[in-house]
Amino acid sequence: MYDAEKFYSQLGKSYKPGIITQVVLAAFDLKKQGKKLISLTGGLYDPDSVPYEPVKEILAEASVEDWQEILQYGNTYGSMELRQELSKFMAGHGIEADPKEIMVTCGSQQALDVISRVFIDAGDVVIVGSPTYLQALSAFRQFHPEIRTAAIDADGMDPDALEAELNKLGSEGKAAKILYMVPSFQNPTSTMLTVERRKRVLELAEEHDFLVVEDNPYGYISFDQPMPTPIAGMDESERVMYTSTFSKIVSPGLRIGWLKAREEFIIKMGEAKSNVSICNDGLSTHVATGLFKRGVVEAQIPKITEVYRRKRDLMLETMDISFPDEAEWNDPKGGLFLWVKMPDHVNTTEMLMEAVKNGVA
């Protein structure tokens, strides 16, 4: 047997399963054994809420011409019809975007990948919240940037902490190139960046000349009040690249994400995307377009929001009864996450694996 290790690239050697992956794999093993599993992993979509009936209707009504288009190569940037629907959808949520400023991606994870390919060189400074979405870090780290952090408090990323980090970089003769943020119901803390802080972030971007990547999978799922205007909706200098996805509001199995940026950036990122994915999935594209046209997407948002509100309430009630007194947690106002701090004597890695053995992932 040959030595496989010597064939890996440096990037290939870096791919090792983290604790979250281990938990998910262990959970799948339990399910294969036919054991009952309570899944609290990865922001999974509520299975009973998937809009399967409208999807079935759209496919049942597809014409011969529709199927010829579905099963043929498509546009790397996504069909113009779907981009027009996305433009209308975003306009209803505070972002004006020409369809030419939109690219359809395979979920928002692919958007993070193409952003990384086009904008990050080795040594470039990328600032993220602390903590932040793990797979965003994985996408960035492929290209060996210098990752810096800014603290997150109860109101999201602290602009004072961000400004302090920017000034520190300046004193070192460096500058930030990209700020990555999940401002609305952040992953993993579920914090909501205030409107005042959103404006301050844009001011700092102008002052220190960096780009902002706004990742918004969760903002539509708001329990108490409408989602604040995204940072991209306040941006007058085209510094913000905005990405969102079907995965949290409609269906993760329909691999539909999208990226909004200045047209020049979209053209570049389309070229980068074509090296990995020549075109989008025709079936998902056709269904997504139909769901927008029938009003299903907008109707699905309040439905799924109510489902997650009930789940949040039950989770908080159960934790209040069952968790140790020393544990601390927040009260999410939207999104899919609840952030818990366990007491120092608890090894959370061991706790996670023990939970899986007991049917909780």
Image (tube, rainbow, N blue to C red):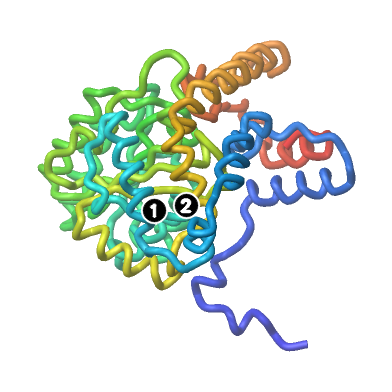
Q: Read off the residue under disc 1.
A: 104
Task: Please say if 116 is above or below 134.
Answer: below
**What is the three-letter code of the residue carrying label 1?**
Val
**What is the three-letter code of the residue carrying label 2?**
Thr
- Look at the numbered disc 2 and give the secondary structure of its residue: helix
Residue drawn at the location 44% of the way across and 48% of the way down: 257
Classed neighbour count for the residue bearing mark 1: other residues with Cα under 10 Å, few (<14), some (14–19), many (≥20):
many
Contact, mark 2 vs mark 1 (Cβ under 8 Å): yes
Separation (CA) of disc 2 from disc 1 = 9 Å
Q: Position of residue 180 (x, y in %)?
A: 33, 45
Q: Position of residue 241 (x, y in %)?
A: 27, 48
- Look at the numbered disc 1 and give the secondary structure of its residue: strand
Closer-to-camera residue (80/27): 80
Q: Is residue 236 left or right of residue 127?
A: left
The label number, if any, that marks residue 176 in the structure image: none
How many numbered marks does the figure carry?
Answer: 2
Eye-nearest disc, 2 or 1: 2
Between discs 2 and 1, the one toward the N terminus:
1
Evaluate whether residue 135 shows in this view.
no
Q: Read off the residue under disc 2.
A: 285
Residue drawn at the location 30% of the way across and 29% of the way down: 92
Q: Is residue 138 left or right of residue 51?
A: left
Closer-to-camera residue (294/268): 294
Evaluate whether residue 216 shows in this view.
yes
Q: Position of residue 334 (x, y in %)?
A: 47, 23
- Residue 5 sits in quarter: bottom right
